Image (tube, helix red, strand yellow):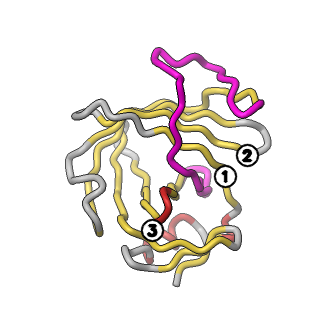
Amino acid sequence: MTVAEFRSRVEPGMKLSVDGKDFVIKEVIKFRLDDGSFYFKCFLNDGYVIADDLSENTFLLVKEIKTLFQPPFSSGLDFTGKKFRLIFTAHATAEEIHGEDIFKQGDSERFWDYQVVDGSYLSLGFADSTKERFDFYGKIVANDTIKLA
């Protein structure tokens, strides 16, 4: 499934299969980046999140974790025995919310995303209003493994 197809169909309460693992979508959020582009982030059951990247036509499946990393974050991090490199840092605001109230419209976050060549993904972030940490670890998943029902 392409990112565009996913965005046109995704709704809270839907079942989502990613790489053979089944989830239920609890909340769908459209985040607007400061540069004007946007991405969708869906909170799933069991602490998982799926996010899309239209420019790369890819998806990230990550799970919330706790890390000991503290800002300022460096351009490279060692985590789980892997050397992650910084690929993106940004600030985004929740523009549209559907489903549970995990994020509210107007809430914003700042994040630093890291990747390893094997597709492993680490995202370190903060909610602007509360300074609560939102760290996630997971992987880039192939579009052909994404199914909505």
Residues rendered magenta in the picture? 54-81
The amino acid at mark 2 is Gly
Report whether residue 34 is seen.
no
Relative horizontal placement of residue 101, taking residue 61 as reference (left or right): left
Q: Which residue is mark 2?
A: 119
Relative to 101, is 77 on the left or the right?
right
Q: CA distance from mark 3 to mark 2?
A: 22 Å
Residue 61 point in image, percent of width and height = 59, 56
Between disc 3 and disc 2, the foreground one is 2
Residue 35: tell me if it is visible: yes
Q: Is residue 14 left or right of residue 103?
A: right
Task: Give the amino acid type for the residue marked by disc 1 in the picture.
Answer: Ile
Q: Please state which amino acid type lies under the numbered disc 3.
A: Arg
Mark 2 touches mark 1? (CB < 8 Å): yes
Identified at 66% across, 50% down, the residue is 139
User: Does the magenta-highlighted stretch encompass residue 58?
Assistant: yes
